[in-house]
Image: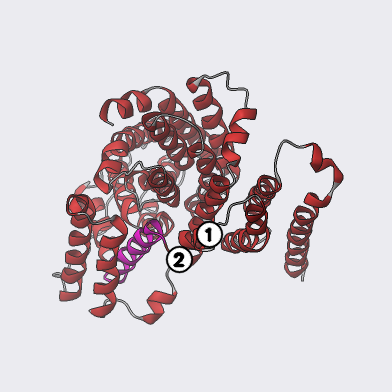
């Protein structure tokens, strides 16, 4: 009863926010704003999306459809009245763009890996080769979580790794601090792992889409070259910090033996599809193939060969795809109304690129802590790409924001992996917050120091 009442209250506040946004353009005070009608409506759509994404009064994917509806019905006439005639296809295109297709291919790969039990097999192998030494086992868990999260949902990876690791806690002393360290490593490493590939986390897809819109094409292999060094450094810092904060002492972990069966034909086919897809993403650009085009291969092959069925297709995380598409569509509105240049001209940047980096990185870290990293990227990256910056500076700034979206993991609500690990009852907020703050600090410092030096050197 109470849950139903709260649900009605959230829907009421969401409806009230929408009504207020629609009424504001008719109020007298807006005449004094330095915005034309189209720009004002874009600001209101942006603010409404930010409020609904942050408050979660509505499911996040519904917000994307609200953005699309307002752009088609409310914004388009205002843009047309200014002498431009935007095609509706401009707003529809983000919902089945190259980036959305790339992510869909990634989700299909994740599904065939899970359905063939290859993810669990790989994770158990990592635990087995560490041979029970606490520091090595912790490093193996961190490595397994990060690697799997590069290619599949970090939420699914967290759930699967927790299932494998929780039984190991019974082999430790009840008062061993290492128990907390083992569980804490899983969500933090999964959050970081998504940094490494374009399909690892939605903010990466949003970044690549907007960069491509500005003529800055980043291939699958180039993205990995730009991000893997940071990922490896962050994982090493996480491993070292957990060992210091939660020492194992004299404890030794005994990984339970498991009778490994030979690979089945289904598993071999799944491995083959995975390998060919990754190879296509790495070298497809040399043959004129976009990453989204390559992603058609695992989608077609998996369903054609019967590795997945219609139920698997229905269970794909469509909400994430539409969430990403809504963020991209929001950027289209900012672009066609030239709102970005108006916002930038109002910022006290004093012509300093370094100050701009400082402001945006701190804003990213704060927003990413209290709201979805996808929503944070969807709000900030469209504004960033509207800046009049040289391509190299724009790329570095977008990369810095994207990486900081993934390192914002202070609270249980900051990311789904955090929430899943927190629900195990092994870790508390007092355990998660210090390590999460360390990752935030690492992301911010990297964005100011190592990141720009390395990125400017290789682009």
Secondary structure at badge 1 equals: helix
Q: Position of residue 401 (x, y in %)?
A: 47, 36
Where is residue 119 drawn, in percent x and y?
Answer: 29, 61
Q: Is residue 112 magenta?
A: yes
In which image quadrant can residue 442 be found? top left
As drawn, is 77 to the left or to the right of 232?
A: right
Q: Which residues are magenta?
A: 97-116
Q: Which of 96/416 is in front?
A: 96
Q: Residues within 10 Å of mark 2 (few under 14, many from 20)?
A: some
Q: Position of residue 161 (x, y in %)?
A: 37, 56
Q: Is residue 259 visible?
A: no
Kindly indicate whether the residue at mark 1 contacts the one at mark 2 (C-beta within 8 angstroms).
no
Q: Is residue 361 left or right of residue 75?
A: left
Q: Which residue is denoted by mark 2 in the rendering?
A: 317
Depth check, front residue: 308 or 412: 308
Vertical relation: 53 (above or below) 227 = below
Residue 375 horizontal side relative to residue 167, left or right: right
């Amino acid at each position: 009863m109470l849950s139903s009442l709260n649900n009605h209250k959230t829907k009421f506040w969401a409806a009230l926010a929408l009504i207020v946004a629609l009424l504001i353009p008719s109020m007298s005070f807006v005449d004094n704003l330095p915005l034309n009608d189209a720009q004002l409506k874009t600001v209101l759509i942006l603010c409404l999306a930010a409020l609904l994404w942050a408050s979660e009064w509505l499911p996040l994917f519904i917000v994307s459809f609200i953005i699309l509806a307002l752009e088609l019905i409310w914004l388009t006439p205002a843009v047309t009245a200014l002498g431009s005639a935007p095609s509706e296809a401009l707003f529809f295109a983000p919902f089945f763009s190259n980036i959305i297709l790339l992510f869909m291919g990634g989700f299909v790969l994740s599904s065939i890996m899970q359905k063939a039990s290859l993810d669990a097999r790989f994770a158990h192998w990592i635990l087995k080769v560490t041979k029970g030494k606490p520091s090595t086992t912790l490093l193996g868990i961190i490595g397994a979580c990060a690697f799997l999260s590069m290619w599949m949902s970090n939420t699914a990876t967290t759930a699967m790794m927790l299932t494998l690791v929780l039984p190991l806690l019974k082999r430790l002393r009840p008062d061993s601090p290492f128990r907390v360290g083992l569980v804490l490593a899983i969500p933090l490493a999964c959050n970081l792992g998504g940094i490494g590939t374009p399909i690892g986390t939605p903010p990466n897809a949003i970044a690549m889409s907007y960069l491509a819109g500005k003529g800055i094409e980043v291939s699958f292999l180039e993205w990995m070259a730009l991000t893997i060094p940071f990922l490896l450094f962050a994982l090493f810092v996480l491993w070292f910090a957990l060992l210091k904060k939660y020492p194992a002492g004299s404890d030794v972990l005994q990984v339970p033996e498991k009778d490994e069966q030979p690979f089945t034909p289904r598993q071999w086919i799944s491995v083959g599809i995975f390998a060919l897809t990754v190879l296509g993403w790495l070298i497809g650009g040399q043959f004129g193939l976009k990453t989204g085009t390559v992603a058609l291969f695992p989608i077609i092959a998996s369903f054609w060969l019967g590795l997945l069925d219609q139920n698997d297709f229905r269970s794909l995380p469509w909400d994430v795809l539409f969430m990403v598409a809504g963020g991209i569509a929001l950027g289209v509105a900012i672009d066609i109304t030239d709102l970005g240049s108006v916002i930038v001209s109002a910022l006290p940047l004093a012509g300093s690129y370094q100050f701009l980096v400082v402001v945006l990185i701190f804003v990213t870290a704060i927003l990413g802590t209290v709201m979805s990293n996808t929503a944070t990227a969807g709000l900030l990256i469209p504004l960033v790409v509207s800046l009049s910056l040289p391509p190299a500076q724009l790329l570095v700034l977008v990369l810095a924001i994207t990486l900081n979206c993934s390192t914002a993991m202070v609270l249980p609500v900051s990311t789904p992996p955090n929430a899943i690990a927190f629900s195990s009852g092994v870790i508390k907020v007092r355990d998660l917050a210090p390590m999460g703050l360390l990752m935030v600090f690492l992301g911010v410092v990297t964005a100011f120091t190592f990141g720009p030096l390395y990125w400017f050197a290789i682009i």
